Image: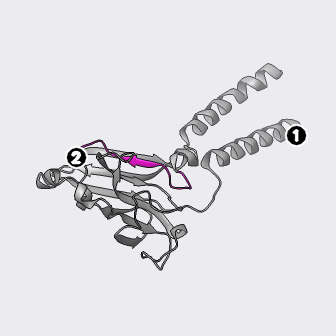
Amino acid sequence: MRQRKFISVLPVLLIAGVVFAAIPSGASVISDALIVLDKNGNIVQQITVTEAQEDPNGTSIFTLPSGFANTSMFGKALVLCESLPCDAKSPVSNFSDIVGIVANNGTPKFLFGFSSDGEKGTPFGSQGAIFLLEVPGFAYDVTLYLDVFRVKQRQTAWFISDGDASPVPEPGTLALLGIGFLGLAGVVRCKLN
């Protein structure tokens, strides 16, 4: 009898496992992206960062390979603020994402990249040059940081930021809770029968 009950519950457990595996956790959701497109809108190069890869101290810098940076834009970063006022006098704790040209470990090699959720100042050596209020999911045109040769080829660069999400339960946690309630309902039903 018990084996028969287990066999009847097995499909439900398998379906629940598949659903749980298909639901991404909050940590694996893409947070920020830097994308370079050609004149036809095809992706030439991109960097995507998940919530888990973000560093609250802003020390992690994500960069495109060599050949994408407009070195004349070094020290002129785009700084996204979490709230107004948003300018060079804003406290660094108000800064969210910072996009620009990064010196690679102090060597003459410059790279095009960004710091995600940097709240301890900018990693580019200055407070930036362009200050904007962050709009989650908005695609910022950052082509001015792209190598001049690539701009002549009509390539464009875009940065997309999701902003700081409010803490909410992860979908995976909610799925587990739902599976638990299903199991509890099944046990109650068996007891009533």
Q: Position of residue 85 (x, y in %)?
A: 47, 80
Q: Quadrant of the N terminus?
A: top right
Instruction: Examine the image and state in which quarter residue 175 appears.
Output: top right
Q: Which residue is mark 1?
A: 192
Q: Which residues are magenta?
A: 55-67
Q: Amino acid at mark 1?
A: Leu
Residue projecting furthest to the bottom: 85
Residue lying at 54% horizontally and 43% vertically, measured from the top left: 24
Q: Which residue is mark 2?
A: 42
Q: Is residue 59 magenta?
A: yes
- What colouring method underlies this structural image? one colour
Residue lying at 54% horizontally and 51% vertically, measured from the top left: 55
User: Residue 148 vs residue 177: left or right?
Assistant: left
Magenta-drawn stretch, dominant element (helix, strand or loop): loop
Instruction: Examine the image and state in which quarter residue 64 appears.
Output: top left
Q: Compared with residue 185, is residue 153 higher up or lower down, i.e. above or below?
A: below
User: Residue 120 vs residue 147: left or right?
Assistant: right
- Residue 182 or 169: which is nearer the viewer? 169
Residue lying at 60% horizontally and 49% vertically, measured from the top left: 171
Instruction: Examine the image and state in which quarter residue 98 appears.
Output: bottom left
